[in-house]
Amino acid sequence: MTLLDSDVWGRKFFSDGWRDAASRHPVVEPATGDRLGEVGLATAADVAGAAARAAEAQRAWAATPPQQRAAVLRRAGELFTEHAAEVEDWLVREAGSVRSKAGFEVGLAIGECFECAGLPTHPQGEVLTTEEARWSFARRRPAGVVSVIAPFNFPLILGLRSVAPALALGNAVLLKPDPRTAVSGGVVIARIFEEAGLPTGVLHLLPGDGSVGRAVVEAPEVRVVSFTGSTPVGRAIGEQAGRLLKRAHLELGGNNALVVLPGADVPKAASAGAFGSYLHQGQICMTTGRHIVHESLLEEYTAALAAKAEALPVGDPAREDVALGPIIDRRQLERVHGIVTDSVAAGAKVAAGGEIAGAGYRATVLSGLTTDMPAWREEIFGPVAPVIGFSTLEEAARIVNDCEYGLSVGILGDVGTAMKLADRIDSGKVHINEQTVNDEPNAPFGGVKASGTGSRFGGAAANVEAFTETQWVTVRPDIADYPF
């Protein structure tokens, strides 16, 4: 039997073992529409039971010696390594990933587990000064039960990057993946940790609709909510969590800028721009959504980027050697095309692409835009590269910042000039001489403005802050004297 044999998970959800579900959701291959199986859907009542069980199991898990918790995380990393090909296949077929993207995502998952294996033994507090005759400490304690709500685009790593550190730090987790990628974003994680020896009841997999999403936020046992997804949904979850006095870590959308400075190497810049805009069909929060090019290079860069786009084949990544796979579903495909056609109607020019190709969309370059056009203002979540020019560094900074989002920015060209521009940019991440799509397990990840609530993932400092609470502890040698 393989790790992901459907006899284990088919028509089930994971809560104190694999349980039969009252309703199911088809697992569909977006490239072909073929059915790959069925996952079980949880209900709000299932969430209530899972949350209560998680709170019970969490106490024993938090009391588990740190090296034992670390061993589970290390074993999870080893299992991802051993089963990499099988997990990659599911990312290709269920999420529409091209093979290289699937391999990259599994590699991140492996790194995440090994990185988080260091958290149980990481310093968990500090010694404080005090005016009293006592010792004073601030120690970090597990938050308790953490709900993780993950999206469809990088379903494995965008769930795991919260699940792994939360578990490592002694929390229990309720994981709600997007139903469209419930295997690669949910079943994979549950099976890996099941095989890694995680105690029963500490991790629960609860695919479902909006009512399940609300339930994993509202459950009274849940203290922290970690959400990755769209800004509108993130706002709603943030409001819900705020009303309930729960912490919400929100990693939301982006309309990320790539700035090409005067004197930049145009062929290399176009290569970086193409990667940033077309990786995983542009379905990444960090996708390069705006290309801001110095006027002296604008024509040359647009032509070079268009040539790159025209050379990228679109198709079924499970059966063809393609650069772009399918858009996740027909609704999103039509939305992408609608933004392109609306922008063209407003005066933009198609330098490449601009067409639906089966279940996918051709790599597209748009020129002649103004900053009020839909393709420039909106997060497209498709393989579309709008290009606009600038004349001065001040104008470039203004264009970059004239956006509701603030997730990732790339700057290509002279490092000194790039550093001056970086200091003027409002963004969670700035990458000089790299494009906008970057992630490492030990690096803080997050955005500002409508891109979320800051760096809440990645690296020991951010993870400890995200998934623990601070408790003040004082110790005296004897009972203190009081005036009452």
Image: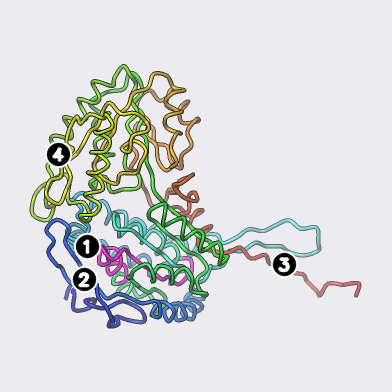
Mark 3 crowd level (few <14, some 14–19, many ≥20, 10 Å Cα): few
Q: Secondary structure at mark 2?
A: loop
User: Which quadrant: the N terminus?
Assistant: bottom left
Q: Secondary structure at mark 3?
A: strand
Q: Position of residue 166 (x, y in %)?
A: 45, 65
Mark 1 crowd level (few <14, some 14–19, many ≥20, 10 Å Cα): many
Residue stretch in magenta:
169-190
Instruction: Give the spatial CA distance, label 1 vs label 4.
Output: 25 Å
Q: Are marks 1 and 4 in contact (CB under 8 Å)?
A: no
Q: Amino acid at mark 1?
A: Val
Residue 182 among those drawn in magenta: yes
What number is the disc on residue 474?
3
Q: Position of residue 350 (x, y in %)?
A: 20, 31
Which one is in front, 152 or 198?
152
Q: Amino acid at mark 4?
A: Leu
Residue picked out by circle 2: 4
What number is the disc on residue 312?
4
Image point (53%, 57%), residue name? 465
Q: Answer with mark 2 or mark 1, whichever residue precedes in sequence.
A: 2
